[in-house]
Image (cartoon, rainbow, N blue to C red):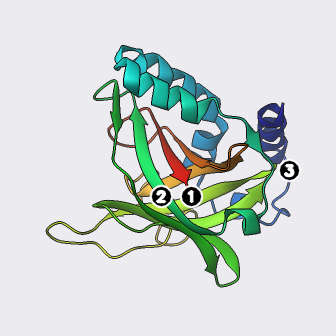
């Protein structure tokens, strides 16, 4: 029910004047559309991942069908172990190893970072419907030429193209068993749906 309410709110905001503070003021129209299609992206990703191994499917089911609960920023803050799971696209699925992630405060606002591994991401979290909308940017580090972390451009002057491989939007939810998940609908490259599983 919480997901239905969340996407009902998204639909209403599309017709409202920009008086709402938060992620709506920063997200590009392209990314707002991606977030509105989160359920569609997840369903397509799961369908494309149906050819994955039984072991992978068990992991995917454990992450995506776990019950989400309302969470405060304080409940999410701290260090996490995290792994990225990609569904659909070039292959049925890819499940990466465990790396380090962190939720902290930056300039007084909740901020998510993937701190290790070659593919990293960072960005601010905006409270929404019991969870948090993530607006971030991915970058490469640790192997060969490294990129510096960069801010999500959104509707800023440096936004450039409508869609870039680096821009990310997603929904971070705390789960009833103490884990968390960051769902990333319709990545620009490689896959149909990504999710980052977080565990203390």
Secondary structure beneath dot 2 equals strand
Q: Which quadrant is the C terminus positioned in?
A: bottom right
Against 113, is 16 above or below? above
Q: Which residue is mark 3?
A: 16
Tell me whether the residue at label 1 lies in contact with that at label 2, contact meaning CB atoms closer than 8 angstroms.
yes
Secondary structure beneath dot 1 equals loop
Marks 3 and 1 sit apart, C-alpha to C-alpha, by 38 Å
Residue at the spot 53% in from the left edge and 68% down from the top edge: 102
Q: Is residue 112 visible?
A: no
Of discs 3 and 2, which sits in the foreground? 2
Q: Which residue is mark 2?
A: 81
> Observer-nearest residue: 48 or 19?
48
Residue at the spot 62% in from the left edge and 49% down from the top edge: 179
Furthest-left residue in this view: 144
Is disc 2 surrounded by few (<14), some (14 to 19) or many (20+) residues within 10 Å?
some
Q: Which residue is mark 1?
A: 200
| Labels 3 and 2: the sequence-earlier one | 3
Q: Position of residue 80 (x, y in %)?
A: 53, 62
Secondary structure beneath dot 3 equals loop
| Labels 1 and 2: the sequence-earlier one | 2
Q: Position of residue 70 (x, y in %)?
A: 81, 50
Marks 3 and 2 sit apart, C-alpha to C-alpha, by 38 Å
| Labels 3 and 1: the sequence-earlier one | 3
Residue at the spot 41% in from the left edge and 68% down from the top edge: 115
Q: Position of residue 94 (x, y in %)?
A: 33, 35
Residue at the spot 47% in from the left edge and 25% down from the top edge: 58
Q: Left or right: 126 with respect to 115?
A: right
Q: Left or right: 109 with respect to 195?
A: right
């Amino acid at each position: 029910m919480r997901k239905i309410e969340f996407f009902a709110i998204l639909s209403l905001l599309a017709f409202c004047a920009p008086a709402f503070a938060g992620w709506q003021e920063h997200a590009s129209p392209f990314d707002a559309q991606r977030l509105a299609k989160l359920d569609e992206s997840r369903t397509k990703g799961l369908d494309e991942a149906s050819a994955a191994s039984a072991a992978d499917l068990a992991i995917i089911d454990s992450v995506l069908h776990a019950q989400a609960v309302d969470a405060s920023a304080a409940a999410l803050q701290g260090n996490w172990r995290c792994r990225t799971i990609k569904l659909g696209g070039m292959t049925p699925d890819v499940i990466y190893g465990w790396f380090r992630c962190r939720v902290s405060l930056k300039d007084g606002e909740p901020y998510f970072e993937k701190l290790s591994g070659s593919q990293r991401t960072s960005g601010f979290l905006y409270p929404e419907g019991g969870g948090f909308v993530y607006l971030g940017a991915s970058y490469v580090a640790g192997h060969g030429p490294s990129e510096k972390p960069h801010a999500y451009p959104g509707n800023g002057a440096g936004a450039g193209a409508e869609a870039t491989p680096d821009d990310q939007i997603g929904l971070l939810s705390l789960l009833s068993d103490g884990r968390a998940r960051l769902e990333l609908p319709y990545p620009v490259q490689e896959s149909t749906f990504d999710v980052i599983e977080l565990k203390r």
